[in-house]
Image (cartoon, rainbow, N blue to C red):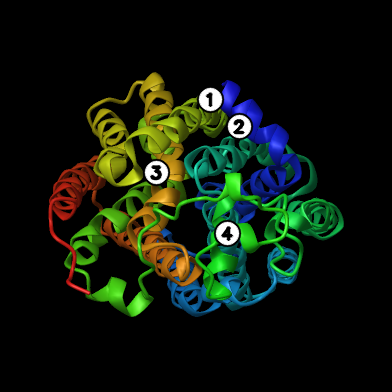
Amino acid sequence: MRSYLRLWRSQPEFLTFGVLLCASASFGQTWFVSLFGGDIRAEFDLTHGDFGAIYSLATLASAVTLVWVGRLIDRVPLLTFSCCVFAGLAVASFGVFQATHFMVVAVAMFGLRLCGQGLMTHIAVTSMARYFDADRGKAISVATLGFPLAESVLPLTVVMVTASLGWRDAWLLWSVAVAGLLLPLSVWLLQRSRALWDVSQLVEHRPAVVEKKQASEQGSNDSSELVGVTESETVIDTSPRSWTRAEVLADPRFRLMLPYLLAPAFISTGIMFHQVHLVDTKGWTLEWFASGFIAYGIAKVVASLIGGPLVDRYSARVLFPTFLLPMGLGVLLLAVSDSPFVGVAFLALSGVTNGLGGPIGGAFWAEVYGTQHLGAIRALAVSIMVLGSALSPVMFGWLFDLGATFSLALYVCCIIAVVSTALAALAMRTSAVPR
C-alpha cells in the first residue's frame, strides 16, 4: 500500500482523472443499459432477440468506429480528445431520453457504446500506460478503480431513480450529470496535471517514459540534455521496440489471442444484457441481483489493487492467460445452481476477472508492443473486445426466442472460457514475427 500512496502523492490529479473516466464509462456499459432493457422492450414492443440485435449492431458499429477514432489519442491533445468524448456521451444519453422510435434508440446506443464503454476506457488506460513507466501496473490499477466504485453504487441507484422518475427522465438526469458535472471536473483535473501529459510543457515533473520519448524525438541518447533532468537522473530505456498496428496484426501471437480478447466481453455482456431474463428464470428479484454488484465492486477493487503490484513484479505477459479463470468458474456455478447466493458468487468472481484484467490487460500491450503506437494498438484491442460484447446479446436473444434455456448458454460460455484460455497460454509460448 505504501507504493500506492507514494504514486498517488506524485500525481493525484492525473490518477483521479483516470478514475473519473473509468467510472464515467458506466453509462455505456452493458450492465447499466440492460437495467432499462425491460422498459425499452415494452415501450417499443421488442422481443429479447429484437432488442439484442439492436444493441449488438450498435456495439458492432462502435467497435469498427473505435479502430479509427481511438488512434486519434496518439495525435490529438488529451484535453481536447477527452472533452469531445464527454460531449458525445452526454448527447447519446439525451438521445435515449427523447427517442420516439427504436431506430433512435439504436443510434443513441451506438453513441453510448462508443463514447462510454469504448473511448472512456480507452483514454483512461492508454493515458496511464503511456505516461507511467516503472509504476505502470499500479497506475492502471488505480485508474480502473473507477469501474468498481461506480458498479458498487450505480445499479441500485439506477433502479431507485428509474422507479421514481421513469426510465426516460432517468436518462435525462444522466445526460445533465455528464455535461454539467463530469465534463467540467475532467477539464479541471487535466489542467491541474498538464505538466505530466502535455508534451509542449517542461519535462521536469514528468515520468521517465515521457523524458525518453522526447530524447528519442530530438535524436539524442543523452537524457541529461533535457530540461530538469540531471546526469544522475538519466534513465536507461529498457522498453521494447514499438510495433506498428500492421506489425501487430501480422504477429502470430496476436491471432492466437483473438478468442481470449473476445471471450470476457462476450460472456459478461451476454449474461448482464439479459440479466432481467436471468433473474426471472432463476426465481430471484432484480433488486437482489443488483445488490450483488456490491460484492462485484469489492472483489474488483481488491483484485485490481493486487493486480497492479503483480504486474510490476512478474510482468503482464506472464499473468495474461490467467485472469479469465475466475469468471469461468463463476459461470459454471451459475449454470449448475439456482441458489440466490450463486448469483452473488458469480458477480464476485466476475469482479476478480475484471479487476485483474485492468492492470494486466492495460500494461500488456505496452510491455509486448511498446508505447509509441500504443493508442492505435489499444484501439484495435478494445474494438475486438467491444466486438465480443456486440455478438452475445443478439446470439443469447435468438437462443432464448428459440426456447433454449439460460443454462445451455452458460455451459457454452464455460467451453469458450476454457478454449480461449488455452489459446492465450499457447500464444505466450509462441515466438514473435521476425522484425
Marks 4 and 3 sit apart, C-alpha to C-alpha, by 29 Å
Residue 145 position (above or below residue 348): below
Q: In this figure, which residue is indicated by the disc labeled 3?
A: 360
Quadrant assignment for the C terminus:
bottom left
> Which image quadrant is residue 56 in?
bottom left
User: What is the secondary structure assignment of the residue under circle 4?
Assistant: helix
Whether residue 41 is visible: no
Circle 1 crowding by C-alpha within 10 Å: few under 14, some 14–19, many from 20: many
Q: In this figure, which residue is indicated by the disc labeled 2?
A: 152
- Amino acid on which disc 4 is placed: Ser
**Disc with the residue nearer the chain's start (3 vs 2):** 2
| Camera-nearest residue between 395 and 319 | 319
The residue shown at (40%, 56%) is 239
Mark 1 or 2: the one toward you: 1
Instruction: Tell me residue 71's x, y (percent).
Output: 52, 75
User: What is the secondary structure assignment of the residue under circle 3?
Assistant: helix
Marks 4 and 1 sit apart, C-alpha to C-alpha, by 42 Å
Marks 2 and 4 sit apart, C-alpha to C-alpha, by 44 Å
Residue 288 position (above or below residue 219): above
Whether residues under marks 1 and 2 lie with C-beta atoms below 8 angstroms apart, the answer is yes
**Disc with the residue nearer the chain's start (1 vs 3):** 1
**Disc with the residue nearer the chain's start (2 vs 4):** 2
The image's mark for residue 223 is 4
Q: In this figure, which residue is indicated by the disc labeled 1?
A: 298
- Amino acid on which disc 3 is placed: Ile
- Amino acid on which disc 2 is placed: Ser
| Camera-nearest residue between 18 and 266 | 18
Marks 3 and 2 sit apart, C-alpha to C-alpha, by 22 Å
The residue shown at (61%, 77%) is 75
**Disc with the residue nearer the chain's start (4 vs 3):** 4
- Amino acid on which disc 1 is placed: Ile
User: What is the secondary structure assignment of the residue under circle 2?
Assistant: helix
